[in-house]
Image (tube, helix red, strand yellow):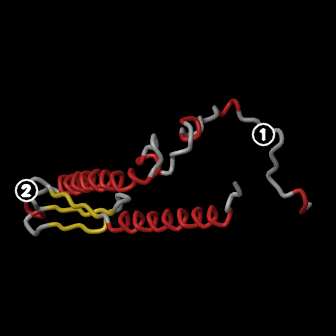
Amino acid sequence: MPTNHRDEVEQLLADYRNSRAQLAMVHRTLLSITESASSPDGLVTATVNSSGVLCALSIGDDAYRRYRPAELADAILRATRQAAAQAGERARQTLAPVLPTGSEPGAVLSGTADLTADEISPPTAVADDEVSYEDATWMNRSGR
């Protein structure tokens, strides 16, 4: 029985177009995510986007009388962290349905999905007594 390659190619193209449309929808949804969180007294409200970037901050007039500067800063940080956690969870929930089984949405969002722990960890510092300057040059040799 002969295979109709044209039909197979058309099906592959249709699948590709559907995947691209789904990716575009997920991307639009991720870009639209914002979450807000407030201090317990409601004087500070922070709003962040799906990446956890602060995009709005509201400080009530009474906050300046009620809080000392360090306390106000702490209330801002707490509200921002809470909003970022909420936005991150919504982003993970948005991304999860379109990922392959076993993929971790948080790792994909952070850009570490295909990296090993060794690749992510910062390089270890070299002790000063282990550094060799034998091949180092402080001047451009071509300019001599």
Q: Is residue 10 above or below residue 81?
A: below
For badge 2, the amino acid type reads: Asp
For badge 1, the amino acid type reads: Tyr
Secondary structure at numbered mark 2: loop
Give the image quarter of residue 53: bottom left
Q: Disc 2 designates what residue?
A: 41
What percent of the width, then of the height, locates residue 76? 22, 57
Q: Residue at x 33, y 63 (%)?
A: 49
- Of the pair 15 and 117, the residue shown nearer to us: 15
- Of the pair 37 and 64, the residue shown nearer to us: 37
Q: Are marks 1 and 2 in contact (CB under 8 Å)?
A: no
On screen, residue 92 versus residue 129, left or right, reads: left
Q: Is residue 57 above or below residue 76?
A: below
- Of the pair 9 and 26, the residue shown nearer to us: 9
Estimate the spatial distance between the alpha carbons at disc 1 and disc 2, rounded to whole Å: 59 Å
On screen, residue 91 versus residue 83, left or right, reads: right
Secondary structure at numbered mark 1: loop
Q: Disc 1 designates what residue?
A: 133
The quarter of the picture where the C terminus appears is: bottom right
On screen, residue 122 versus residue 135, left or right, reads: left
